[in-house]
Amino acid sequence: MNAKIRPLSGFPELLPAQRVVEQQVVDTLRHVFELHGFAGIETRAVEPLDQLLTKGETSKEVYVLRRLQEQEGGKDAGLGLHFDLTVPFARYVVENAGRLEFPFRRYQVQKVWRGERPQDGRYREFTQADIDVVGRDTLSFHHDVEVARVMLDALRRIDFLPGFRLQVNNRKLLEGYFLGLGLDDPAPAMTAVDKLDKQSPEAVAALLVEGGLDADLARRCLAIAEISSTDTSFVQQVRDLGVEHPLLEEGLTELAAVVEGCAGLVGPRVEVVADLRIARGLDYYTGTVFETRMRGHEALGSICSGGRYDALATDGRTTYPGVGISLGVSRVLVPLISRTGLVADRSVPSAVLVALVDDAPEARAASEAVADALRARDVACEVSPSPQKFGKQIRYAERRGIPFVWFTTAEGGHEVKDIRSGEQVTADPAAWTPPHEDLRPQVTSHDPQEMTK
Amino acid sequence: MNAKIRPLSGFPELLPAQRVVEQQVVDTLRHVFELHGFAGIETRAVEPLDQLLTKGETSKEVYVLRRLQEQEGGKDAGLGLHFDLTVPFARYVVENAGRLEFPFRRYQVQKVWRGERPQDGRYREFTQADIDVVGRDTLSFHHDVEVARVMLDALRRIDFLPGFRLQVNNRKLLEGYFLGLGLDDPAPAMTAVDKLDKQSPEAVAALLVEGGLDADLARRCLAIAEISSTDTSFVQQVRDLGVEHPLLEEGLTELAAVVEGCAGLVGPRVEVVADLRIARGLDYYTGTVFETRMRGHEALGSICSGGRYDALATDGRTTYPGVGISLGVSRVLVPLISRTGLVADRSVPSAVLVALVDDAPEARAASEAVADALRARDVACEVSPSPQKFGKQIRYAERRGIPFVWFTTAEGGHEVKDIRSGEQVTADPAAWTPPHEDLRPQVTSHDPQEMTK
């Protein structure tokens, strides 16, 4: 077939040595999610369009499907590609409620599609990694702490990525504060706080005044958004504002519990901040809310967000509350790969190239036997495609980043050469194993300070 | 959000304990592919429509994409979901040719979409696992043997699946035979052999006679399709037909090499047959062709097919020959799961449920500390969501298939109970590990004889 070259904007693809980076990230996420008892599921890529459009604001981003030979208005009409993993998960929970055990912990790493304008960190096809805990009728608060801890545990283990800052807040805290200030409807103030990310406090305050608040009240509404702390000292800072409301108390208690619950995981690579400016625009969040910034790449915005919703899904009779957090895998990796050259040290899984002595079938069989012996001990390897001069076979390995070349000598002996050091030693195919760090491709870590230069 | 229940025919989804089966299959495939030096890549889900339609016959199955808010004929018009992994791989090779090393071994496990009528073993969304080796300008024949060996090595290791029979043939062999018989154009005879799968030899011979062959020649054309052998004895059987042609010789040599090269992998779970009836309809195959049947489920047709193509891709100046084989992961698993109840022994990754003594924050912290200690040694576990009576906590574990429940005693001691045997022993959270077979969910193997009852 004649393959035309047509790169598509917004549909990033990776070269083999870059794909290793993504695969290792996904492997670590999955490993940690499973250690914490989260079950992996996948949902179909399509949902009925009416289901996708209940989320209003994002409707314009949906890709609609049609079979090429289908008549207009055929019965397939009305299917679209999912634009997140929450809508399909909510549907999966309701559809399979009778066959699931609650509380149900699940993780899901899949591609999603949005027809939005491609830009830095925004793609039309990208991979997300979601964890959620969902209950039937009720879901204890401690799961809010749990999902934060699980994601932190995963992020801190991916040591070739820059550091992360998890910013936590609680919508009860904000809502209670606004009610305590005497506002009848806390929604406009909530929206205003959410805008502080992109507009100045003065501009946002002006909007509140336009909405009918007096200037002093508008200022007091925004005062809470200036509070942040990496410990629970934010509680006293809020109390110092002199506002009281039962919902505010509940929010303070919950937020303090998340910060305290995560304390054991904080380290050089991950920090946790109670940041009272975080509101999350989406109105289905009802308590804890999360956002996450990547150190040195704050302009990408939040790369890992989520929160608590009292009704992740409902079938009319039963309500399924949930709490979850979603990592934008592509959103983190694609910019890092292109900006910092984040890449694995080889483009093939092979740790060893088994050289070929000559063109005789016996020579190939002998090299294949060595390869099979290595594979039996989980050493990835490949046999030279052709019996070129050994110098050429070594360059074949070099170009792929394969660290070792295996030679069979004329006398039937075996030698293995580390082509980086040049060291060559006799070796037994049934016993030799490369050093642990050479067994699999290694991703080079990059200093986040260097990246932005 | 209000999630409506709408199962979609042809878009299979799995419950958590079923998804474990699929995940373990994909993990084994990936492990074996990497052991043999194949690099994993992923390609975008969409391709330009004109690219997807070069394959003619399948055009009616393509799902076309449109952004919901897009005007008719907008610039996104003309994108479709890929219906296999070969078309995108060919495009990827040409697009990245300057940045790849050839011969290039790659594996790719991804979903594909076809708008065809859903039926047993045929889906609208399904997962395929492809391996291919592609060369620039040339590709040695031994890679034909290699891809067969790699797929056999993978299939034989997935011990909870029924056995497999790899059927191999060579189009040079068939074409040379037909040319040796004196046919000017071997294509109609090739097509006829391909039809023997669904029609009687008499009906197929009648078609050839209709096409202008005399009855004896038609009979001789089909005689070769009756030959098969699990060793190289097919060579003599072909010679006994008394037809000679250089291309026939070449095909015989190549097919014998594949059968001999695979001999070391044949065992109770996988067999290899030179089956001279296998033609593969697609006309881009030029040498070796593969099909695979699953024992006890032959009616599903070939679940793993492929072959050699002299031009996997071309950019006009350079041609990229390739050889590959593609396993229909969903095609194997979805019918097995629904027919035989193939499933993992638990619905969660957790090997241990850490029980909760009471509602005090200290009690939860103590249980979490036990869980963290177990996780530090890669033991997946979860903490009870609430401090119910221990009998209820044990039933919580039972319903999920979690084999062990961990109790902290009032005196600060630790005991772990195997809830299957009832055995309870004292244990140290910093040292205890479950037996290896309990560390991860196990998939129950099913006797293929039992399945079809």
Image: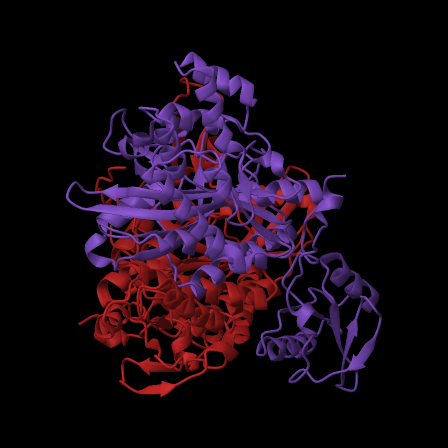
Chain colours: A red, B purple
Direction left: furthest residue: B317
Q: Quadrant of residue B445?
A: bottom right
Percent coordinates x, y for residue B403 in the rendering? 74, 66
Number of numbered callouts drawn:
0
- Residue B451 at least partly seen: yes
Residue at the image position 58 percent from the left and 33 percent from the top:
B6
Position of the C terminus of chain B, as image quadrant, is top right
Residue at 35% over, 60% down: A19
Query: Which quadrant would the N terminus of chain B be assigned to in this image?
Result: top right
- Whole-percent x, y for residue B184 in the image: 31, 24
* Residue B139, x across and y down, in percent: 29, 52
Left or right relative to B399: residue A266: left
Q: In percent of the image, x 58 and y 53: which residue is there?
A: A322
Q: In this rendering, would A319 be left or right of B223?
A: right
Q: Nearer the viewer, residue B192 or B96?
A: B192
Picture layout, residue A123 above or below residue B112: below
Would residue A274 be visible to someone looking at this image?
Answer: no
Task: Report the front residue among A420 and B215.
Answer: B215
Q: Residue at x 53, y 57 (%)?
A: B263
Return the x and y of residue B390 as percentages of the image width and height: 81, 68
Q: Nearer the viewer, residue A292 or A111?
A: A111
